[in-house]
Image: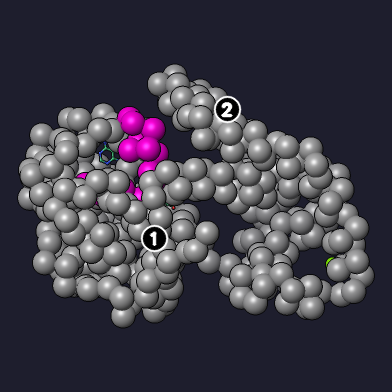
């Protein structure tokens, strides 16, 4: 499938500069979108709930802050950046009552639109600007002069220029510097969930843990700390360059051991994960756990936070002054 990628010369920044933008939520993505848009010269306000801990932080950063209802009422483009599982309720209570014909509802992930948990009125645009990176990196790379690539999608084009708005919004958060990729809500939702589950978060963390459980002594350095260096080489110049940089011994071991660890059974498991994403079973299960107070999620989080490798890692990282942390 041909992928269409747009860069700065393909985008009209004036489209988003001519709109009032509301960012609902000031977490990982929220702070990055709001600050990057502000620095790009866009008229942006942050909408938060009463008593939000983020209120002072956003104001100190120079942003206009108001209640969600006020921000939604004032804005032409309303970007919802609160956790996916809270979005349907906040949308119903604080956003839907303020949507006017021709407004644009925006998301950074397609979950609620794709699986039908949020149904927007027909006379508003529904767009997505999904940065392909964590919020703190979206902000960090923007301030460094680069940017995280974005997926831009339109689910509903009520005004006829929803694409221009989506692309221009992506420009404002820095996406045009490294590429805006045109996609659909279905593609973004399924591919984002698959990537984070099978490879990026699920796959990598479990791989590191399995390495540590097999070889606890030096595993932090061998299987955790070096992960970034290997991935950096792949990211900068490709797997072939990573293979060129490592020893022949390591490269031989890679070809010999890789397919034993990630084998036919792992591929079957990946297919099953993709099927459950595509048929909506994963979404249903996730939403049910949210309604149950995140019981399963919190149990797993507790277990992973208490894993021996996290304690070992925390001590070692303390000694690396060059490892930056955005943890708050
Ligand atoms: P988050 O958990 O970091 O932040 C959510 C923010 O919303 C917090 O500041 C929280 O206090 C606030 N909030 C919670 N309830 C609220 C309410 N009722 N009203 C107003 N604010 C409320 O969220 P996130 O990880 O940035 O995710 C936001 C969206 O971005 C999701 O759709 C997610 O899938 C998507 N996304 C996230 C990332 C990422 O890097 N985390 C990457 C791509 C896409
Ligand atoms: Mg995601
Ligand atoms: Mg080695």
301 to 312, vertically: above or below? above
Q: Secondary structure at mark 2?
A: helix
Q: 37 or 273: which is nearer to us?
A: 273
Q: Secondary structure at mark 1?
A: strand
Can the viewer see residue 4? yes
Q: Alpha-carbon distance for marks 2 and 1?
A: 37 Å
Q: Residue furthest top?
A: 292
Q: Is residue 103 left or right of residue 201?
A: left
- Residue receiving disc 1: 182
> Disc 2 or 1, which lies upstream in sequence?
1
Residue 21's tag is none
Task: Specify the segment rendered in magenta.
Answer: 105-117
Residue 132 percent across, percent down from the top left: 46, 58
Q: Is mark 2 within 8 Å of ligand 1?
A: no
Q: Is residue 205 left or right of residue 151?
A: right
Residue at image position (39%, 66%) is: 180
274 to 81, vertically: above or below? above
Q: How many marks?
A: 2
Q: 82 or 259: which is nearer to us?
A: 259
Which mark's residue is nearer the viewer, 2 or 1? 1
């Amino acid at each position: 499938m041909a992928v269409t990628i747009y860069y700065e010369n393909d985008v009209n920044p004036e489209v988003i500069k001519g709109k009032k933008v509301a960012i609902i939520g000031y977490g990982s993505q929220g702070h990055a979108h709001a600050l990057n848009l502000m620095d790009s010269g866009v008229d942006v306000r942050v909408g938060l709930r009463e008593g939000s801990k983020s209120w002072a932080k956003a104001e100190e950063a120079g942003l206009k802050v108001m209640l969600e209802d006020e921000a939604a009422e004032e804005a032409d483009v309303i970007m919802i950046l609160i956790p996916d599982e809270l979005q349907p309720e906040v949308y119903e209570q604080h956003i839907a009552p303020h949507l006017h014909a021709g407004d644009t509802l925006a998301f950074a992930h397609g979950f609620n639109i794709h699986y039908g948990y949020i149904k927007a009125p027909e006379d508003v645009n529904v767009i997505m600007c999904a940065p392909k990176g964590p919020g703190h990196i979206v902000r960090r790379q923007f301030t460094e002069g680069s940017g995280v690539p974005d997926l831009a999608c339109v689910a509903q084009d009520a005004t006829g220029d929803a694409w221009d708005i989506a692309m221009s919004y992506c420009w404002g958060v820095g996406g045009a510097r490294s590429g805006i990729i045109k996609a659909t809500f279905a593609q973004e939702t399924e591919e984002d969930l698959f990537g984070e589950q099978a490879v990026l978060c699920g796959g990598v963390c479990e791989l590191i843990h399995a390495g540590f459980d097999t070889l606890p002594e030096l595993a932090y350095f061998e299987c955790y700390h070096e992960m970034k260096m290997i991935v950096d080489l792949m990211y900068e110049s490709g797997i072939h360059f990573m293979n060129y940089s490592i020893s022949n011994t390591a490269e031989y071991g890679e070809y010999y051991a890789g397919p034993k660890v990630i084998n036919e059974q792992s591929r079957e498991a990946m297919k099953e994960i993709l099927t459950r994403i595509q048929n909506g079973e994963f979404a249903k299960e996730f939403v049910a756990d949210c309604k149950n107070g995140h019981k399963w999620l919190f149990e797993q989080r507790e277990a992973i936070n208490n894993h021996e490798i996290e304690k070992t890692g925390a001590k070692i990282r303390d000694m690396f002054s060059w490892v930056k942390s955005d943890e708050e």
